[in-house]
Image (tube, rainbow, N blue to C red):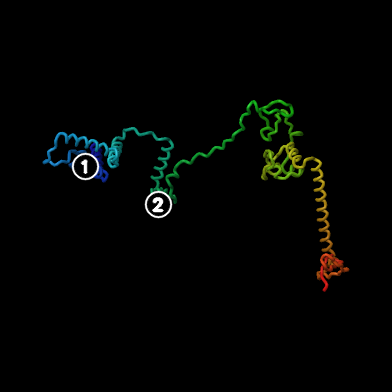
């Protein structure tokens, strides 16, 4: 107990000798007109009017001085930062001397953060680099205090289901003409058919994107840009799971889009025939070119090219009345030459 009292006296003496206390003492003397005497021991301070003994003060003057002193003291306590620091220092020392005073309970997160910080400080050395407080963990790197904080929880990807259907907007099945609230085709393709009338084997079959473009001669813009955009579902590729997922469209909707583009099935068939003919011609031309290269490789002497310059063999000349000039044509290459006669 005696050592504790001695420690308290040392703290108070240190506070009285500090710069903040001296500034506060000077401000009190200047504003209130009081004299403060300190005989060197803690808490032994006396206040009194700074008036010479030879001056006589009347009763009204003392009352006025007392009022001014109280008002000045009140203003000083409210506005002086030095006095506030002194009071805060006294409050901190009283809390240190009275550990039994209950402190506000810390949250579990703050307590764990404080424990981690204390452990890091106990294992390493606290240093400051360019005003930033760092902890040398002894492992070859510096750790900032904010790195000890717990990571924020990852955002949860919330999947929002479509809103409930209002009774006034309940769809009607195109097959049985009964109302229903939800179905596979309505949710994925927007096609109003209930699950009871769904026929995925014949009527409501699927078609891949590649087959839709080849069979109905559609382009990417017809599937992705033309309104309304056709819906699809993704399924793993059965040929190789490492390839990209397949896009499965509803065949009924693809046929309807093809009619919007080509206007009729007959035009689609005609276009198929034209493309098939062009494809056959291309194959024949490619085959003929390969055969010619093969013959040239086998009997190159029959396919020697004349690399000399071409000599024109002109036909009969003719006169042009409009241009007042003459012209003649080469009988081999068909080049026409115009010229004048002097």
Q: Is residue 155 left or right of residue 304?
A: left
Disc sitting over residue 175 in the figure: none
Q: Residue furthest right?
A: 316
Q: Nearer the viewer, residue 67 or 21?
A: 67
Compared to residue 333, the image places residue 108 above or below, namely above
Give the image quarter of residue 326: bottom right
Give the image quarter of residue 178: top right
- Quadrant of the rendering where the N terminus is positioned: top left
x, y percentage for residue 180? 68, 27
Instruction: Look at the image and tell me whether residue 55 can be seen.
Output: yes
Q: Nearer the viewer, residue 99 or 168?
A: 168
Q: Is residue 62 left or right of residue 192?
A: left
First of labels 1, 2 by sequence position: 1
x, y percentage for residue 35? 19, 41
How far apart are labels 1 and 2 at the CA level? 42 Å
Q: Residue furthest bottom?
A: 342
Q: Is residue 13 left or right of residue 283?
A: left
Residue sitting at x 68%, y 32%: 186
x, y percentage for residue 283? 81, 53
- Category of crowding for the residue at label 1, using alpha-carbon neighbours closer than 10 angstroms: few (below 14), some (14–19), many (at least 20): some
Q: Nearer the viewer, residue 182 or 315?
A: 315
- The residue tagged 2 is 130
- The residue tagged 1 is 29
Q: Nearer the viewer, residue 289 or 228?
A: 228
- Category of crowding for the residue at label 2, using alpha-carbon neighbours closer than 10 angstroms: few (below 14), some (14–19), many (at least 20): few
Instruction: Look at the image and tell me whether residue 13 can be seen.
Output: no
- Quadrant of the rendering where the C terminus is positioned: bottom right
């Amino acid at each position: 107990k005696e050592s504790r009292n001695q420690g308290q006296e040392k703290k108070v003496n240190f506070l009285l000798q500090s710069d903040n206390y001296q500034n506060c003492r000077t401000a009190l003397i200047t504003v209130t007109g009081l004299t403060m005497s300190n005989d060197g021991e803690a808490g032994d301070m006396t206040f009194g009017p700074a008036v010479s003994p030879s001056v006589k003060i009347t009763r009204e003057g003392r009352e006025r001085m007392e009022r001014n002193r109280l008002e000045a003291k009140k203003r000083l306590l409210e506005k002086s930062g030095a006095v506030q620091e002194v009071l805060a220092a006294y409050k901190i020392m009283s809390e240190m001397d009275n550990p039994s005073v209950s402190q506000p309970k810390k949250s579990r997160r703050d307590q764990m953060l404080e424990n981690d910080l204390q452990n890091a400080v106990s294992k390493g050395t606290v240093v400051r680099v360019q005003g930033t407080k760092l902890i040398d963990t002894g492992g070859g790197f510096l750790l900032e205090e904010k790195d000890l904080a717990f990571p924020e929880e990852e955002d949860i990807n919330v999947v929002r289901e479509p809103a409930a259907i209002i009774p006034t907007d309940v769809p009607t099945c195109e097959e049985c003409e009964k109302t229903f609230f939800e179905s596979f085709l309505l949710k994925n393709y927007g096609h109003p058919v209930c699950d009871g009338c769904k026929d995925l084997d014949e009527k409501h079959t699927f078609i891949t994107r590649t087959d839709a473009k080849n069979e109905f001669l559609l382009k990417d813009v017809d599937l992705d840009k033309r309104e309304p955009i056709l819906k699809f579902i993704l399924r793993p590729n059965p040929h190789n799971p490492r390839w990209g997922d397949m896009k499965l469209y509803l065949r009924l909707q693809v046929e309807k889009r093809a009619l919007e583009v080509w206007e009729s099935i007959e035009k689609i068939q005609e276009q198929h025939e034209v493309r098939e003919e062009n494809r056959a011609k291309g194959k024949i031309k490619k085959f003929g070119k390969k055969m010619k290269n093969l013959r040239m490789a086998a009997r190159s002497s029959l396919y020697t090219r004349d690399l000399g310059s071409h000599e024109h063999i002109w036909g009969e000349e003719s006169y042009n009345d409009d241009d007042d000039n003459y012209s003649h044509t080469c009988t081999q290459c068909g080049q026409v030459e115009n010229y004048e006669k002097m």
